[in-house]
Image (tube, helix red, strand yellow):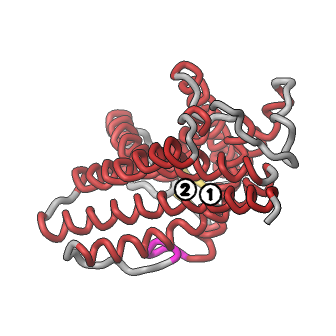
Amino acid sequence: MASGDATRLGALGRGALGALVAALAIGAATAIGTLAEARFGIGGMAWHALRALACSAVAVPLIVLLRRRLDRRTMAGLGLPDLRTGMRDFGLGALVTFGAAAAMLGLGHALGWLRFGAVSWPVLLAFVAGNAAVALFYEALPEELTLRGYAYRNLSAGLRRWTAALCTTLLFLAVPGLASVFAAGLATLVGAPAPAISATPAGQDPVAYLILLTVFGFALIVARVATGSLWTCIALHLSFLTINRISFFGDPDRTGWSAQMTTPDALLLVPGYLLLTAAIFLLLPRLQRRRVGVGWRSRDPEPAQT
């Protein structure tokens, strides 16, 4: 086998490992949540917090282990800069995502697709804080670390950037189905009711869900490549979840504010603001008068020490 083929196969294998860790972490968290609810009656915020902690407790150590023992490199190479730079990148991700969402929500309101409700600031701020804490450890951190962090870093070392980005997005689409398999198996193992195995979450239209997940994955990988920082992706992911849970799918009594849809077309605003977010990140290097490495057509091999 030629060395180039071996490099590509190795990149694909390690990329798949990142997705498997993501699926295992989500599946384990789901099984633990099912067990806690069925056997101990745990519910509400305690239930959400338990699942969130379980997910990160599985994903983070496994990625650290893979990075140090298998890759034999440091975590910084996954797009994790020093704290000061990371917080700046996080702020950029949140600013761009919230700005794009505000523009699209404003457009929806102008078109008559949305009606905004009154704001209860104490309820809204309490919801944002609680949701952010849970979403960070259950979704944003473990999924970004495993996919746009570990999987993409290894894929882009052996494949062209655009190919690595495509593969990472395809792996992202596969994670929910794989997670349901892990969840069912682990729940059965611990004697809890086994959740159904499905490629998409229960109650979701499969086609609409996978289309939205594709657009979401595209926006995340663009942010990763454009900024080189995983913290930008974590901020985008967390902002996306916060915006949607408040505006489109929130109960104003629980979230403190909501946007009432007057037409089903209003749901197009969600992929709309994700695409706008991706467009801003694509233009960002030009606005900053710099190029993204050596371009989307080139590989991104790791230095000897990262």
Question: What span is colored magenta in the figure?
Answer: 199-205
Q: Is residue 116 visible?
A: no
Q: Quadrant of residue 43?
A: bottom left
Q: Residue at x 46, y 71 (%)?
A: 201
Q: Work out whether 97 lies above or below 17.
A: above
| Amino acid found under the numbered disc labelled 1 | Gly
In the picture of the structure, the residue carrying the numbered disc 2 is 18
Residue 132: % across, % down? 41, 41
Q: Helix or strand or loop: what does disc 1 sit on?
A: helix
Q: Work out whether 44 lies above or below 233.
A: below
Q: Work out whether 67 lies above or below 121.
A: below
Q: Is there CB contact under 8 Å for labels 2 and 1?
A: yes
Q: Residue at x 40, y 58 (%)?
A: 25
Residue 291: % across, % down? 85, 31
Q: Work out whether 209 lies above or below 230.
A: below
Q: Residues within 10 Å of mark 2 (few under 14, many from 20)?
A: many
Q: Residues within 10 Å of mark 1 (few under 14, many from 20)?
A: many
Horizontal relation, residue 119 to residue 261: left or right: left
Relative depth, front residue between 262 and 279 = 279
Magenta residues, dominant SS class:
loop
Q: Is residue 114 visible?
A: yes
Q: Helix or strand or loop: what does disc 2 sit on?
A: helix
Residue 15: % across, % down? 62, 57
Q: Quadrant of residue 96?
A: top right
| Amino acid found under the numbered disc labelled 2 | Gly
Q: Which mark is residue 15?
A: 1
Horizontal relation, residue 298 to residue 65: left or right: right
Residue 236: % across, % down? 58, 42
